[in-house]
Image (cartoon, rainbow, N blue to C red):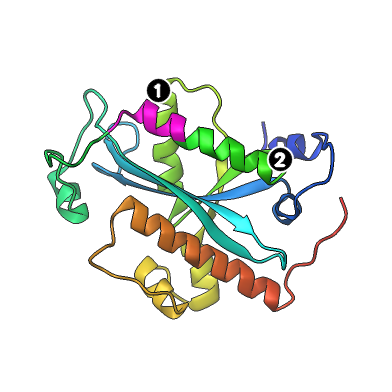
Amino acid sequence: MSADLYDDELDSSSHSGPRHPMAARFRGYLPVVVDVETGGFNCATDALLEIAATTIGMDEQGLLYPEHTQFFRVAPFAGANIEQAALDFTGIKLDHPLRMAVTEEHALTEIFRGLRKSLKANSCKRAILVGHNSSFDLGFLNAAVLRTGIKRNPFHPFSSFDTATLAGLAYGQTVLAKACQAAGIDFDGKEAHSARYDTEKTAELFCGIVNRWKEMGGWMEFDD
């Protein structure tokens, strides 16, 4: 199935009742910011250790804002590879008594349950992942879905919005901390590399770029 054909399936879906303006902004997709912390770079073999997801809302003026964040520390799946260099980089301590990690299935089930409520509230049919270097986060999300056998994944399986690319266009910066600084967003390097913190900062960055584009006259709503 081609990417265009996949998206056409969404366009052909029927809509009943008044649609939320968010549904018109991204063709029926709800942006959801996701960040993962992992035991390495290989989504098939390396552990998922943290995951956070922030839903995006829209106010009466059509401006986006970070809405609600779900965050879970995740227990490594059986046989998962974990590089010590990854733990050193993120500062994650797997044996910390307050880590209170849950299974991948539990984390994804809870996140997806919340997302379905947001999809309904925004008249959207599917979520689309927003991430800083989004292919990395989407790869680990999809791998975890495959491992757990979850059937109803609300995310588009291969499309995403990448704030590294958007920030490069808007501010000439592709590193999250530097992009936030350029956008006037506070960023604490000591808090970085936590899935919750990075997700919430990425959400601020995404909303800021989209809102700036709207305020410059770069997007107008058209009838379907």
Quarter of the figure with residue 194: bottom left
State whether residue 181 appears in this view: yes
Residue at point 69% right, 76% down? 215
Residue 205 in the image, given as x and y percentages of width and height: 49, 67
- Magenta residues span 102-110
**Residue 145, above or below 29:** above
Residue 146 in the image, given as x and y percentages of width and height: 43, 25
Q: Earlier in the sequence, mark 1 or mark 2?
A: 2
Residue 141 in the image, given as x and y percentages of width and height: 43, 37
Where, quadrant-wise, is the N terminus in this rendering? top right
- Residue under label 1, please give it: 148
- The crowd level at tag 1 (other Cα within 10 Å; few <14, some 14-19, many 20+) is some
Question: Label 1's element?
Answer: helix
Residue at point 57% right, 70% down? 209
The kind of secondary structure the magenta stretch mainly shows is: helix
Q: Amino acid at mark 2?
A: Asp
State whether residue 3 appears in this view: no
The residue positioned farthest toward the right in the image shown: 223
Residue at point 57% right, 54% down? 56
The disc label shown at residue 7, or none: 2
Residue 183 in the image, given as x and y percentages of width and height: 47, 77
Q: Amino acid at mark 1?
A: Thr
